[in-house]
Amino acid sequence: MDLPVMPPVKPMLAKAVKKIPPGMQYEAKWDGFRALAHRDGAELFLGSRTGKPLGRYFPELADALLARLPERCVVDGEIVIEHDGRLDFDRLSERIHPAESRVRMLADTTPSRFIAFDLLALGDESFLDTPLAERRATLERVLAGVTPPVHLAPATRDPAVAARWFEQYEGAGLDGVIAKPLDLPYRPDERLMYKIKHERTADVVVAGYRLHKSGPVVGSLLLGLYDDRGALQHVGVCAAFTAKRRAELIEELAPLVMDPATGHPWAAWAEEAAHEGARLPGAPSRWSGKKDLSWVALRPERVCEVGYDHMEGDRFRHTAQFKRWRPDRTPESCGYGQLEEPVSYDLAEILGRD
């Protein structure tokens, strides 16, 4: 492979802002795996945001990208999987599996798509120093009429359209809106774009914690919500405490520690079979590898308010943010019913019908 921009390349990133800024190009924020596709004739390298190869996990994309991308190019995009008209991150995560036979089976049953939204190189020319507006125009030209499973990401310069996308597209599993300055060159691994994500709050039960890697202080709080059967389901964690606050939480939560955890709603977490039909902390994961998933059980008596952006099924998609304790709320009152549900929106309306 001999391209003007060679792998590995870390993609350009975005920093969070509260509102959609004016005077920019706007795109949907896709909830998938960021990937850069390097093609040089019959050679293709699909790299992750950390530069690691992704090609073996998405074999169905190799032929598709070779057939649809320009002969020699570097394209920035996102790998996604659709299910029932929505992006499905859980099904996407299943692809990161050591067994080639399983990856091949999943490629047949839940095929992926590649959403292209930036151009880093074409032919012998690097586009890293080219303004975004020119990169986008060239990308639109070379991908004109592209067919699934490769897609050109919709883009607009109208902030009113971006605001409508922000409200509607969440129903198809998208994650917000990205704003890009029109004169912005491509700068790998720098946060020069802007992301606008949904902000919501929920009252949740604190039912345990994990220790921080720095020592015997709280690393993250384990959060739960009651389902309509009265079972406490693990929905995620909140973290990002200061070092001082981590130490304070150890003392603050000490009276609630259950050791042993007999009688705790998640006491069977270490048994693989217990995760079938229930959401417990410490679920087996291809992401966690040999990571210590043990945790300290707490009597589920305290409630806190957390901020979150959106749900993935019955859990928080990302780490939640601790807001405050809620001594006025009972744990039993913290159920899924309080969560805001986005209006459903068919992904095909964004990408076009296959």
Image (spheres, rainbow, N blue to C red):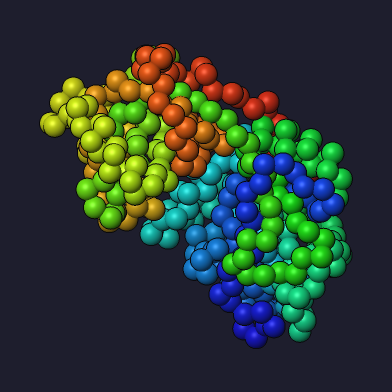
Locate residue 4: give its quadrant.
bottom right
Q: Position of residue 180 (x, y in %)?
A: 75, 56
Quadrant the C terminus occupies = top right
Name the foreground residue: 323 vs 55. Answer: 323
Res 296 visible:
yes
Does 211 appear above or below 324? below
Does 89 appear above or below 114? above
Q: Position of residue 161 (x, y in %)?
A: 83, 40
Toward the front, the furthest residue is 244
Task: Name the residue rendered at 71%, 50% in the picture.
Answer: 178
Q: Position of residue 232 (x, y in %)?
A: 34, 22
Task: Name the residue rendered at 81%, 53% in the picture.
Answer: 24
In the image, taking residue 189 as reference, residue 223 lies left or right, namely left
Locate residue 5: give its quadrant.
bottom right
Q: Position of residue 96 (x, y in %)?
A: 45, 55
In the image, taking residue 97 as reference, residue 282 lies left or right, namely left
In the image, taking residue 170 as reference, residue 308 lies left or right, namely left
Task: Name the residue rendered at 87%, 45% in the picture.
Answer: 158
Does 212 appear above or below 280? below
Task: Name the residue rendered at 72%, 33% in the picture.
Answer: 167
